[in-house]
Amino acid sequence: MDCTTERIAPRPPVTERRRWLLPFAVEGDLRFLSHQDTLRLFERMLVRAAIPVRYSEGFNPHPRLMFPLPRPVGVASVAESAVVELTEDMEAEELQARLVRQSPMGLRVGAVRRLVASERVHPKAVTYHLALEPGHNGELSTAAQRLLSSETLFVERTDPKSKQKKTKDIRPYVLDVRVDSEAVEFVLRCGGDGSARPLEILELLGLNGLAVQHNLRRIHLEWENN
């Protein structure tokens, strides 16, 4: 009787994920960069900074780099974040310093930090700020109150693929709208089911969104609890 047992090959060790959160701000003319342009900008920065970035596998590998909440074109921001995965360990100070040296004017990299293995990087809410010209009338405050008291807020959107128009209720995404003598701020919920667009909120407040959006700033990003 053959009592030999079949040897089972050991499983290869699980590769450690070295994910980093890279906070950054976008000001000046760089706010007009599209999402794809911003992605390419960061790819060039990482290459020039000699950062050991992990690439995807396949015929056309690309850096494991993503933006949890892409910024609308034309909107400045002090609350942006990118997530990048590396192949080697690095000190936070060294990673930030290398990126800062390769950052163009208008882009400021903040204090980076390594994400723990189970940490989620899903945005929960985002706050926008629009400075107002002195002497604006009270109609904006009335519009904000009317917006918050509405049960539904239907907007018209064009599907980018089919080019067909459709309506969407964005009221579930509007968490708060605040107006004072100097500015208007609004907080939007964001998640896997989408969000409202800043331009839509500006239009619902009675403003010419396209005319003032370049003065809009993203000032805070709240993350889901891990």
Image (spheres, rainbow, N blue to C red):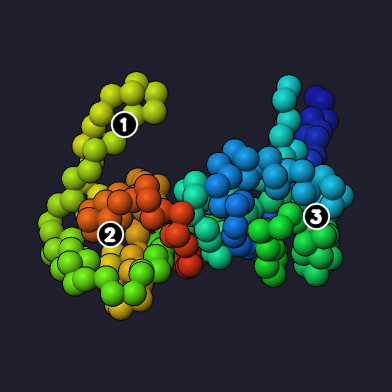
Tell me where residue 86 appears, x and y as whole percent: 77, 50
Label 1 crowd bin: few (<14), some (14–19), many (20+), radius 10 Å = few
143 on left or right of 75: left
From the image, which quarter does the N terminus lie in?
A: top right
Residue receiving disc 1: 158
At x 33%, y 51%, the residue is: 209
Q: In this rendering, is residue 144 above or below 48? A: below
Residue receiving disc 3: 102
Q: In this rendering, is residue 69 above or below 176? A: above
SS at badge 1: strand
Task: Please tell me the numbered disc located at residue 174.
Answer: 2
Q: Are marks 2 and 1 in contact (CB under 8 Å)?
A: no
Which one is in front, 185 or 134? 134
Q: CA distance from mark 3 to mark 2?
A: 37 Å
> How many numbered marks does the figure carry?
3
Give the quarter of the image for residue 115. bottom right
Q: In this rendering, is residue 130 above or below 156? A: below
Q: Earlier in the sequence, mark 2 or mark 1?
A: 1
Label 2 crowd bin: few (<14), some (14–19), many (20+), radius 10 Å = many
